[in-house]
Image (spheres, helix red, strand yellow):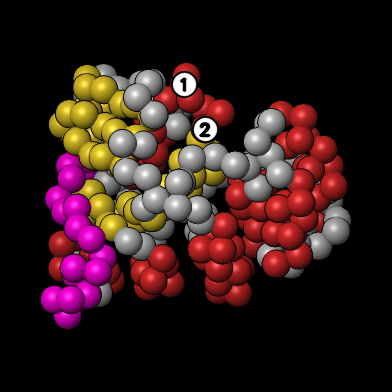
């Protein structure tokens, strides 16, 4: 098993971010993490990335606490956190120095396919910066890619390019867990969908099984969480 949450609860004071959640992430799976605002999606992703510790329960990546295996995972948060002075070439030098698994050739191919302009991030649009951050993330040879709302607040063209790049860079030995409100656009990417409501797991299903029953991920989202 690539990653696992075992009976995990995360409290923020008296507020509950996650409650008694158990979830397994095997190799080679694209998982859609879906829920309304405040459902616990970001909490779950940050626990997997080792950015938060559980109040109770156990979180593991490759059989160890996530902090011990950060070299094997990529976390791309929803915050537009990219230095405004950085250019695509600067980003390549930065990532090469920080991460031994960063692949410059793959990164340059992503710059081209995502149509990222050759200018500093401060002069880019929000969508262009989102695509630059994605190129930096996908150019790493990780085993677990954790994406928290990579499509939020950007234009439809950028969304399509981002989704195509995620599909294009997926490997059979790696897994992706993707949180998004853009359910309709991302639906074709998901092999499995996990629905949260107020920190509780309400449905964990294979997307193909939903389709065989004549349901879409979007219609299931509206039924389960609407």
Magenta stretch encompasses residue 203: yes
x, y (%) of residue 44? 33, 37
Q: Count neighbours of disc 1 (C-alpha within 10 A) and say few if under 14, some if 14 to 19, many if 20 or more.
A: some
Q: Nearer the viewer, residue 194 or 200?
A: 194
Which residue is labeled 2 in the image?
72
Residue at the image position 32 percent from the left and 61 percent from the top: 191
Left or right of 23 on screen, residue 41:
right
Which residue is labeled 1 in the image?
67
Q: Which of 97 and 219 is in front in this view?
A: 97
Mark whose residue sits in front, 2 or 1: 2
Image quarter of residue 32:
bottom left
Of the two numbered discs 2 and 1 on the same chain, state the one appearing first in sequence.
1
Answer whether residue 5 is visible to the viewer in this image.
Answer: yes
Q: Distance between the residues labelled 2 and 1?
A: 10 Å
**Residue with the most extreme front position:** 172
Q: Which residues are drawn in magenta? A: 198-215
Is label 2 in a helix, a strand or a loop?
helix
Task: Work out whether 211 lies above or below 140.
Answer: below
Residue contact between numbered discs 2 and 1, judged by CB atoms under 8 Å: no
Is label 1 in a helix, a strand or a loop?
helix
Task: Work out whether 152 lies above or below 186.
Answer: above
Q: Count neighbours of disc 2 (C-alpha within 10 A) and say few if under 14, some if 14 to 19, many if 20 or more.
A: some
Quarter of the rendering occupied by the C terminus: bottom left
Magenta stretch encompasses residue 193: no
Q: How many labels does the image show?
A: 2
Residue at the image position 60 percent from the left and 49 percent from the top: 138
Left or right of 52 on screen, residue 126:
right
Residue at the image position 53 percent from the left and 59 percent from the top: 166
x, y (%) of residue 179? 39, 52
Image quarter of residue 58:
top left
């Amino acid at each position: 098993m690539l990653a696992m949450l075992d009976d995990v609860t995360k409290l923020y004071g008296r507020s509950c971010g996650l409650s008694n959640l158990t979830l397994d992430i095997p190799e080679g799976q694209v998982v859609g993490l879906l829920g309304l605002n405040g459902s616990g999606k970001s909490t779950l992703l940050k626990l997997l990335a080792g950015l938060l510790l559980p109040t109770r329960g156990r979180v593991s990546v490759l059989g160890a606490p996530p902090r011990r295996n950060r070299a094997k995972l990529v976390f791309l948060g929803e915050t537009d956190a990219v230095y405004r002075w950085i250019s695509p070439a600067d980003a390549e030098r930065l990532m090469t120095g920080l991460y031994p698994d960063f692949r410059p050739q793959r990164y340059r191919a992503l710059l081209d396919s995502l149509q990222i302009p050759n200018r500093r991030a401060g002069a880019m649009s929000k969508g262009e910066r989102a695509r630059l951050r994605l190129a930096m993330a996908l150019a790493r040879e990780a085993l677990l890619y954790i994406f928290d709302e990579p499509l939020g607040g950007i234009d439809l063209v950028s969304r399509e390019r981002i989704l195509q790049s995620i599909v294009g860079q997926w490997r059979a030995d790696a897994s992706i867990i993707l949180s998004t409100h853009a359910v309709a656009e991302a639906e074709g990417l998901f092999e499995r969908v996990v629905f949260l409501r107020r920190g509780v797991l309400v449905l964990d299903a294979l997307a193909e099984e939903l389709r065989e029953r004549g349901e879409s991920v979007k219609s299931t989202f509206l039924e389960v969480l609407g």
